[in-house]
Image (tube, rainbow, N blue to C red):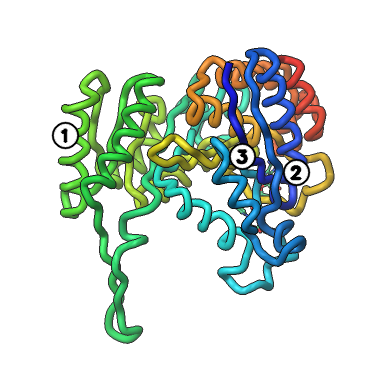
Amino acid sequence: MMNKKVAVLSGDGIGSEVMKQALRVLKKIEKNFGHHFECIEKNVGGAAIDASGEPLPKDTLEVCEQSDAILFGSVGGPKWDHLPHEKRPEVGALLPLRKHFDLFANLRPAGVTKPLRHFSPLKNEIIGDGFEYIVVRELTGDIYFGKKSGDDETFGADEMKYTRPEIERIARVAFQTARNRRKKVTSVDKANVLSTSRFWRKVVQEVHTQEFSDIALEHLYIDNATMQVLTKPHEFDVILTGNLFGDILSDESAQISGSIGMQGSASINTDGFGLYEPMGGSAPDIAGKDKANPIAQIICVAMMLETSFGLMEEGVSIRKAITSTLNDMYRTGDIFSEGMKKVGTQEMGDAIWSRL
Ligand code: NAD
């Protein structure tokens, strides 16, 4: 029996609708497996700006600090678009949370199951029976955070840099993730050109030899990797990469995975503390209309159970319930096609809940 505290930040737009379904699933897991999850709901993003003038109020941050994980919905919307950049819900809430908790590892699963393969831009013969891999992207270092210079006239420059501890800790996350999966890591860099990448490769290799020799390790250049995910997605299990290359690879992977309403992501730190959020935004165009797909948010619950709490069986039971619901033809608008059963957010949640 496990006792955990979860900070629930639904945010704006479809956030509260999809979160409601995710929390029902969490409650069902609690009952089925005899755990206790104390969920504390707090304002974040536009909703928090409306209530208290701040996108990440102090009491919200305090509850996150006292919790074992953060279940995040999505933030932002036209109502707050006029605000200065740093006050906007996305910038003023998510970035400070990542920084405050040192969430250096971004885990983005990618994949397509056979029943949904027509939503992927990849050809059927490439997808076959489906594919599934995960991108582990370093989130707090690299060229995005290096020294910046330039004079607006003759040059602009950004320093690309990784230190040994930064590489070691993200490599460990990738190898550890692979250990619970198909035991293969592909490290992506540009070691033929960049000295940062040559150092990256050396350190990844060392961590592998010293701590994870049971995992298969291969290295790919970023230009080759962007092609390989399009032509041989089955070859990948865990892709380990830095911030810049990971930005590109994780978006490319999201694109070939089909609907954004199906994909969750995790950002974690060395203690395994994590923030779990859907890849999509607050979808103002469908908010409040019972149209949003709750699967991405429900996947976030599975990822939280597996990654932060080590509850693998519980996570798998959620994934099985989702697959079974999709096999029974339940579809929200974003994944609907002729001959399927069209349902809203609530009914999709019901169908998954009842299969748990
Ligand atoms: P979006 O992801 O909200 O929407 C893009 C399209 O995907 C829309 O057509 C939307 O209806 C659809 N969609 C997204 N999630 C869906 C779901 N669960 N089910 C069905 N359809 C879904 O992106 P956007 O329109 O560019 O942004 C809207 C707002 O969200 C903006 O304010 C943006 O800044 C914010 N945003 C927040 C986050 C975050 O909180 N992490 C991420 C991205 C965008």
For the N terminus, the image quarter is top right
3D distance between C-alphas at marks 1 and 2: 45 Å
What residue would you read off at disc 3?
Answer: 71
Task: From this view, report whether residue 214 is shown above or below residue 288.
Answer: above
Q: Amino acid at mark 3?
A: Leu
Observer-nearest of 116 and 162? 162
Q: Quick check: is the Cβ at mark 1 less than 8 Å away from ligand 1?
A: no
Task: From this view, report whether residue 98 is shown above or below residue 33.
Answer: below
What residue would you read off at disc 2?
Answer: 16
What residue would you read off at disc 1?
Answer: 206
Q: Tell me the residue at 70%/35% (across/down).
A: 294
- Circle 2: is it few (<14), some (14-19), or many (20+) Cα within 10 Å? many
Q: Amino acid at mark 2?
A: Ser
Q: Tell me the residue at 40%/42% (across/down).
A: 105
Return the x and y of residue 261 as percentages of the image width and height: 65, 39
Return the x and y of residue 153 as percentages of the image width and height: 32, 86
Can residue 78 be seen from the camera position used here? no
- Circle 3: is it few (<14), some (14-19), or many (20+) Cα within 10 Å? many
Q: Amino acid at mark 1?
A: Glu
3D distance between C-alphas at marks 3 and 2: 12 Å
Q: Tell me the residue at 67%/13% (across/down).
A: 32
3D distance between C-alphas at marks 1 and 3: 34 Å
- Figure disc tally: 3
Q: Is residue 60 left or right of residue 142?
A: right
Q: Callout 3: helix, strand or loop? A: strand
